[in-house]
Amino acid sequence: MNILYHAHSGLRYLVLLVGVLAALVFAYGLVARRPVGAARGLTAAFTGLLDLQILLGVALVIGGVFYGALIGHLATMLVAAVVAHGSSVMARRATEERRALTIRLLGVVATLLLIAVGITAIGRGVLGSGPQTPAHTQPAPVSR
């Protein structure tokens, strides 16, 4: 379970990195008024990594890692996934490239904000590391 926890904790950096990269590329495409050939691929990578992150989180909960603060974390992250997938679908249905880029940019930025809120809901910094393992999984102190 410890490996799964560290994978879940570490994957957030890749999710955030791809999300920020996607937001920058989409913003550049809008400002430069140029189509972004990698738009669908970046969106798919971001949502795919987010899905993997959620899968790892659900596996942790099923494996018995649960404490009260996780309720807000779980709810926020599920909303983030819905926003990411919803904006992806809306962008694919858009008939104009500029509109699609706007939808993708807003979707990624909203998702990144929700991810930041979800991470802080469990007492961690978005980029910093908190305790290496949740308090309830650390061994109890030995009294002498």
Image (cartoon, rainbow, N blue to C red):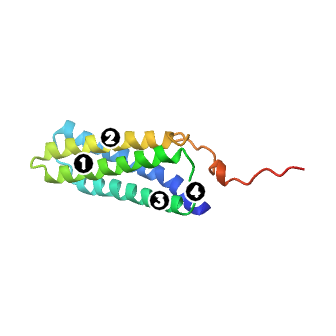
Type of the residue with mark 4: Val
Circles 2, 4 touching at the beta carbon (< 8 Å): no
Q: Residues within 10 Å of mark 4 (few under 14, many from 20)?
A: some
The part of the image, by quadrant, that contains residue 105 is top left
Q: Residue at x 57, y 56 (%)?
A: 65
SS under mark 4? loop
Residue 140 visible, this angle: yes
In the image, farthest residue toward the right:
144
Q: Left or right: where does residue 53 sit relative to residue 85?
A: right
Circles 1, 4 touching at the beta carbon (< 8 Å): no
C-alpha gap between disc 4 and disc 3: 10 Å
C-alpha gap between disc 3 and disc 1: 23 Å
The circle drawn on residue 110 is: 2
Type of the residue with mark 1: Ser
Location of the N terminus by quadrant is bottom right
Type of the residue with mark 3: Val
C-alpha gap between disc 1 and disc 4: 31 Å
The circle drawn on residue 65 is: 4
Circles 2, 1 touching at the beta carbon (< 8 Å): yes
The part of the image, by quadrant, that contains residue 33 is top left
Q: Residues within 10 Å of mark 1 (few under 14, many from 20)?
A: many
SS under mark 3? helix
C-alpha gap between disc 2 and disc 1: 10 Å
Residue 16 visible, this angle: no
N-term-proximal mark, 4 vs 3: 3
The circle drawn on residue 87 is: 1
N-term-proximal mark, 2 vs 4: 4
The residue wearing badge 3 is 58
In the image, farthest residue toward the left:
95
